[in-house]
Amino acid sequence: MAASSGTAEPTAPDGAIGREPFAATLGSLLRTREATVIGALVVAVLTASLLVDSFATSRNAGYLLLDVAAIAMIALPMTLVVITAEIDLSVASTLGLTSAVMGHLWTMGLPLETIIPLCLLMGACLGAVNGVLVTVAGLPSLAVTIGTMAAYRGLAYVVLGDRAVTDFPLSWTTVITGRVPGTEIPWIGLVLLVLAAAFGVLLHATPIGRGLYAVGANPEAARFAGMSVRWVKLWMFVLTGTVAALAGIYWTLRYGSARADNAFALELSVVAAVLLGGVSIFGGRGSLPGVIAGVLLFGSISNALRLARVPEEALVAVTGLLLIVSVVAPNLADRVREHRTRRSRTRHATTRTPTKPRTEQHTGGPHA
């Protein structure tokens, strides 16, 4: 009869194998910033549904999507820029300049099939200006894009003045605000879905996306690893400018109005949504699911406040408050987490410190 193999392993009930790693993984997921934002979104939607009339309707959900579409579009490339530890505050002015140029070209008699590619090309050039000033001239992106924010908005007034161009064809404006047949979902919602999937694959499933995290976390290490940090950042600014121009085209056709002051101060809403979604302002961290949840959270709060007839001035204050919370709260959470980690390590080090063996005093004897 074979002997048992030494020390017996602790037995576990059926199904217990692997339960502990699953629980640990689930606990780690629930402690992420993305889970916190999604939880806040659920709480905000439930609260607004109970307290605000007409919020929990499919028609209002369609309008909410139309309202946040421009913010969501620009937030996608802005996420990539912030992950590389940069920022672009000129996006709303790029949108306004695109709208002004679009209206000016329309009054000159050009068809929209020609105007739209030209506007997208202009947006890429505006983004390239930011990228060159940041990567070639070595200037901080915060200062550069504050300057271009004023310059692009001023150019928009030079192009169109204080006029408004409103005679765009209904065949275009109705398509932008149209709904998927049989639903209250606007077509722009499907466009956002495709864009979010494309940016999600780029950021989370390609070497380029992993490179963006490396550039944001430690640019020197990324450079030693063979990455061209300058080119990566330059292309992110070009991409952001192009998508901001696309948002300008959407904005103009959705409201049927080309004006130089379109989307004024929208950059604050975009940055607030991105940071609210868990992207670190210092770069190297963040994810697109969290940003999408942040955009929907921001849009749901704004939509509920408008339905509750809160003045627009108060909405601006709410945007600023969310921006502050999205910056301060993650830093406080990180400090609390680091403090707990240090305490845990100190406790383990104390409990594992070996006690010195007692030295027996040699007293001599018959075997000495």
Image (cartoon, helix red, strand yellow):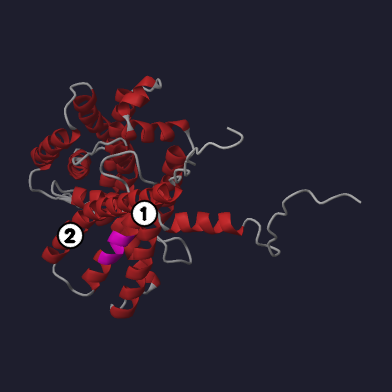
Residue type beneath disc 1 = Arg
Name which residue lies at 30% across and 65% down. Answer: 300
Q: Position of residue 122 (x, y in %)?
A: 25, 32
In the rendered structure, the answer to whether residue 191 lies left or right of residue 263 reads right
In the rendered structure, the answer to whether residue 151 lies left or right of residue 175 reads left
Name which residue lies at 46% across and 66% down. Answer: 183
Q: Residue furthest right?
A: 1
Q: Quadrant of residue 317?
A: bottom left
From the viewer's perspective, is the residue at label 2 or at label 1 nearer?
A: 1
Q: Which residue is mark 1?
A: 33
Residue type beneath disc 2 = Leu
- Say if mark 2 contacts mark 1, CB within 8 Å: no
| Label 1 residue SS | helix
Q: Quadrant of residue 22?
A: bottom right
| Label 2 residue SS | helix
Q: What's the magenta bit mostly, secondary-structure-wise?
A: helix
Q: Is residue 112 magenta?
A: no
Q: Is residue 293 above or below residue 214?
A: below
Name which residue lies at 33% across and 41% down. Answer: 77
Q: Position of residue 135 (x, y in %)?
A: 24, 25
Judging depth in this view, the residue of 163 and 137 nearest the camera is 137
Q: Can residue 55 be spotted in the picture? A: no
Judging depth in this view, the residue of 24 and 261 nearest the camera is 24
How far apart marks 2 and 1 lie (CA) works out to 18 Å
Judging depth in this view, the residue of 359 and 117 nearest the camera is 359
| Res. 181 mark | none
Q: Which residue is mark 2?
A: 321
Q: Residue furthest front?
A: 366
Give the residues drawn in magenta, as a range: 297-301
Mark 2 crowdedness (10 Å alpha carbons): few <14, some 14-19, many ≥20: few
Q: Quadrant of residue 134?
A: top left
Between discs 2 and 1, the one toward the N terminus? 1
